[in-house]
Amino acid sequence: AQKVTQAQTEISVVEKEDVTLDCVYETRDTTYYLFWYKQPPSGELVFLIRRNSFDEQNEISGRYSWNFQKSTSSFNFTITASQVVDSAVYFCALILSGAGSYQLTFGKGTKLSVIP
Amino acid sequence: DTEVTQTPKHLVMGMTNKKSLKCEQHMGHRAMYWYKQKAKKPPELMFVYSYEKLSINESVPSRFSPECPNSSLLNLHLHALQPEDSALYLCASSPSKAGKNEKLFFGSGTQLSVL
């Protein structure tokens, strides 16, 4: 069975600080996909990134960056120069890549509060 | 703006009521999902429709009855719910066949309260 652990339940930072959200996963499969979703107070989950298990290249998108390390089974998410609009719950998730694999395994989420 | 529209945004119902949640997408997606999310918890998968056919039912009680009238619409019919069913119900869609590791597009959800 798969497992995703987001050890940080809640984080508070002051605006413009950098913040890293941790995600550690467990799976015996060698092929899988990892995701990050953002859930603002409005409720909808917003897709941020998808990474397959064979692509360990780190990614940067504006103020967002992701560090995928298979050696430590981690897929951490960093927000640079945080803004109040970044306040949300962030979920890390994993899905196996096999046929018929439909179930996203979510972590419990990290609530990020950015204080002006 | 989300491209998956859910109505109503809020719903309060008694345990004897019958109500329906609606979800609509016009992105041509062929897989649609219902998730249930309790406060401070991650979403939990309830149902998956792939090409308008129910492909996954995650052992959901029969008081929840999904329906997919066409490729753009997904309903969740509610009857004789319990207070513990109070939660945020999220609809999602993905481009093609469920289980292809595609990103999901979520609606804003219906916040359901069962009295």
Image (cartoon, coloured by chain):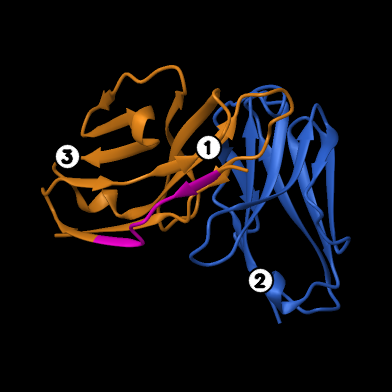
Query: Cα distance, mark 1 to mark 3?
Result: 24 Å
Residue A9 within the magenta-colored segment of the rendering: yes
What kind of residue is marked 3?
Thr
Q: Which chain does the residue under circle 2 lie in?
A: B
The residue mark sitting in front, 1 or 3, is 1
Residue B52 in percent (x, y) is at 83, 31
Can you say whether B31 is above or below A88 in the image?
A: above
In this rendering, position of residue A100 left or right of residue B66: left
Give SS at disc 2.
Answer: loop
**Picture quarter with the N terminus of chain A:** top right
Magenta-tinted stretch: A3-11
Q: In the figure, B13 relative to A33: above or below?
A: below
Crowd rating for badge 3 (residues with CA inside 10 Å; few <14, some 14–19, many 20+): some
- The residue depicted at 26 percent of the width and 31 percent of the height is A65
Please give the chain letter of the residue carrying mark 1: A
Give the quarter of the image for residue B61.
bottom right
Mark 1 → mark 2, Cα distance in angstroms: 26 Å
The blue-tinted chain is B
Which label number is shown at residue A94?
1
